[in-house]
Amino acid sequence: MRPATPSIILLLALVCASAADAQSYPARPIRLVVPFGAGGGTDNLARIAEPFVSRALGQPVVIENRSGGGSVIGMDIVAKSAPDGYTLVMTDTSIAVNPSLRPLPYDTLKDFEPVSLLATAPVILMANPKVPATTLPEFVALAKAQPGKLNYASGGNGASTHLGGELFKLVAGIDIVHVPYRGTGPAMNDLVGGHVDVMFSGISSAKPFMDAGTLRAYAVTGDIRNAAVPDVPTFAEAGLGGVTASTYWGVLAPKGMPKEIVDKVSVAFAQAMRDPAIVARIAELGYLPIAGGPAAYADNLRSEIEKWGRVVRTANIKVE
């Protein structure tokens, strides 16, 4: 028999070390980056899932909000982290919007490892009660009568709430001004305060203000009404079909994370999205659980990148 070459010995050692790391994973707390501020749809979902995932993995999952750049700052941190399973990111549809919207310091499809497709939810169009329009048709008529005078907030350039607003403008044929914020929380605060007129938002962020009567809902995306806000019509019911801007949430890791660790983390998040208590809680906030694995999330990313790329090009959206 020929003796093993040094390169073969090194390869075998690396394979054995990788297998040992996967078996012992996790051996310390895991950082879950949320590339948005506190109080938004992604942050809400992360904090609901975190206790279950921490128990399932046997280590604390520490949520770290790193907002800015329409999620780019937080995503870049994760892209450049070690692919050892100790840095993950939970994000929304902004990951699929950004490739068409701006230059990125990472490659969305090449620098991340899809782990779990968690959930989806429609977005809802909210208005400050001071806006003199109580229904969606009234608001469209008001915007057409005052082009460029009304505005809409979003959680940032490239956020799903931004693209939802641009799609609404295209379908309705109106001119309203985009006002980006650094996260859903600050945008929602200014909407409640009357500093901006309307805003697309995840239901989880908007519902407390709806329940308190401090915001008015015009319509929700999706083919059917959402159980969390059953009194709010869909856009189609309100006479404006074609506003399809649902949000998807998922977990990714830096590219190169061992498959065994990807699978272990994916199972933990999938189990969380199937847990009856969590399912009931997120349903109250408008989320629909998916609990998809790495392949499902990879397919979703490719499809959403193509979809929102068409919207960006059609609307000629530019961000600085």
Image: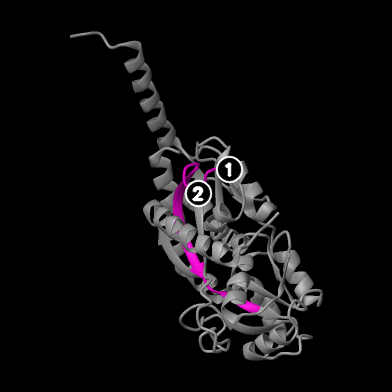
Q: Quadrant of the N terminus?
A: top left
**Residue sitting at 38 percent across and 17 percent down?**
10
- In the displayed structure, 232 sits above or below 53; it is below
Amino acid type of the residue that numbered disc 1 sits on in the rendered structure: Val
Residue 78 is tagged as: 1
Q: Is residue 144 left or right of residue 286?
A: right
Q: Position of residue 212 (x, y in %)?
A: 72, 83
Q: Does residue 173 appear anywhere in the picture?
A: yes
Separation of marks 2 and 1 at Cα, in angstroms: 9 Å
Q: Percent x, y for residue 167?
A: 58, 72
Which residue is at a point 48% across and 40% down the rendered structure image?
255
Q: Nearer the viewer, residue 314 or 258?
A: 314
- Residue 245 as seen in the image, left or right of residue 22: right
Q: Residues within 10 Å of mark 1 (few under 14, many from 20)?
A: many
Q: Which mark is residue 25?
A: none
**Looking at the image, can residue 35 be seen?**
no
The residue sitting at 61% across, 47% down in the picture is 103
Total marks in image? 2
Q: In terms of secondary structure, where does tag 2 sit?
A: strand
Viewer-side residue, 313 vs 277: 313
What is the three-letter code of the residue carrying label 2?
Leu
Q: Which mark is residue 252?
A: 2
Q: Secondary structure at mark 1?
A: helix
| Residue 287 rendering spot, x and y as whole percentages | 52, 71
Query: Is there CB contact under 8 Å for labels 2 and 1?
Result: yes
- Nearest to N terminus: mark 2 or mark 1: 1
Q: Which residues are magenta?
A: 106-125
Q: Is residue 38 above or below residue 193?
A: above
Colour convention: one colour
